[in-house]
Image: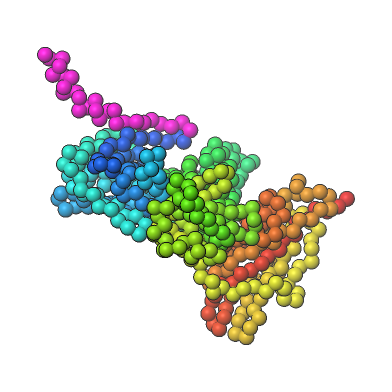
Amino acid sequence: MKPLIILLTLLPLLSLAQKVQVNEYDKFTKQRRIELQPVRIYTSGKANVNISYSASGSVLYLQLSGAGWGASAVDEGQELLFLCSNDSIVSAKSTAVQTAEVNSSFQTAFKHSYFVKMSDVKLLSGCTVIGLRKYGLGDEHNLKIPMANALKIKSLSALFLEELRIGNIFRNVQEIPVSEVAKHVGDSVRFCTKVYNARYFQSVANKPTVLDVNDNPSSPLNVIIWEQDRKNFGNAPEILYNQKEVCITGLVQSYNNLPQIVVKNRNQISLKSSLSLAEVDKFTGDSVTVAGRVMGSKFLSNSPTSPLLLNLTSADPNKQLTVLINSKDRGNFGPSPESYFLNKDIKVTGKVEMYGGEPQIVVQSKNQITEVPLQMVQAKDTPQAGQLVEPVTNPGMANTGVRAVANKSGEKAASFPGGQDALLSFIKSNVVCPESELQMGEKKVVVAKFLIKPDGTASDIQITQPGGNSFDREVIRVLKMMPKWEPHMSNGTAVPVSVTQPFTFARPGK
């Protein structure tokens, strides 16, 4: 009888132990990784909802998954609320834009990740959850939690706290401005900023990639990606993130008395900037915003899911993106979305996936699509006299010609700070010619088109005359490094303007 009593006593502990999937030091990421198995907190007919916890280093996550309830896309920062019986509320925030998909049972299913704080896990381990509220793109979902499942949430939260104690992880992720990072050495933080420069130091030990994310010289901060982690970023993080608005999560360390954050995977960097179609396939698996024009639409009524396909293209026919709207979501986009969006410039927000070797984004809500205003000033095809620079003969330099022309009274053309000579100097100083891809005496001409916004920043870069992948990428990289322009002025008001910029790459002959 005594062994039986002991076994019955240990059963609750054994059941908890089975929920720990991983708690180990990952030698590849060089940080503690903790994962708990999902626990079912709601079941009704065809609906089910599960929660789980995980930790990557000191960053804590709560995963909510299910089908038949709450299956809608979520935006970055949208809340998941746990309502407790004592009237307290625990909030977790979505890590990124995340979509829902049709599973093998033809249910709309989702698996969404949220940032969670240590203090919130402690609250969930002590309170009785009576309700759940999940905010989605354009909607919200409410769920009553039965008492038996409320105990499961308590138990799972307590287990996660214990695994964090075992793994010696007790740091909360703190939302801070980038200017205060130096005050948080030893803390896990999250901040949003711009990558002002990105460099890959191949000749230095461990070959670090350094992202410069603070333009204040009195508060230097280095974000480091070591050589062994470059594969997690397509082996080119210095191209992926340069001149982009990002949010970064990580542990602040001190190196040579300067703050430093080591980024090991893409989950630590989320994009805020809009992407062009030329680079969207480099962000497979990420939640991004992409700009382009809908040049074609196709409603596949004979397909099992009857999807609508919007073909987003740019001036480069090789750069396309499919925006997919499933039949069940058509009603969210008006009576005839295939006609409404055709020939419109839009921005699409969602997770990039590859289908048939081509990128696509599945959208469920009209909130994921933003129409771009068509009130921009169009550029003339012919530049002003004196604006074209004579072709150069040295490799790595480029012939430039700005084609943003003020052709009306009361208008002032957009201009690079310092004028045309300063622009030429900037390009000569920064462009690197793929010389190995040029024959002796050969020239390549690349023409790019981009938008100068009213605040002077360049966006929506498109290659209208490609010169080859290496040359196109170099042009895009250099254009993204440009400082703010003087914006185009129309009757005293700054307005967006389209600018065309040719580059000529040349390799001297014998």
Q: Residue furthest bottom?
A: 409
Specify whether residue 3 is painted magenta.
yes
- Residue drawn at (45%, 45%) of the image: 304
* Residue 143 magenta: no
Q: Residue at the location (43% across, 58% down)?
A: 368
Q: Nearer the viewer, residue 357 or 284?
A: 357
Q: Position of residue 31 (x, y in %)?
A: 42, 36
**Foreground pick, 196 / 291:** 291
Residue at (67, 74) in percent of width and height: 380
In-front residue for pair 186/474: 474
Q: Which residues are magenta?
A: 1-28
Question: In the displayed structure, would residue 339 be above or below residue 36?
Answer: below
Residue found 66% across the figure and 67% down from its top = 500
Residue 510 relative to residue 163: left or right:
right
Image height of 50 relative to 281, above or below: above
The x and y percentages for residue 430 are 67, 57
Q: Is residue 95 above or below residue 368?
A: above
Visible in this render: residue 401?
A: yes
List x then y, in percent, for residue 30. 45, 35
Instruction: State the residue lying farthest toward the left.
Output: 1
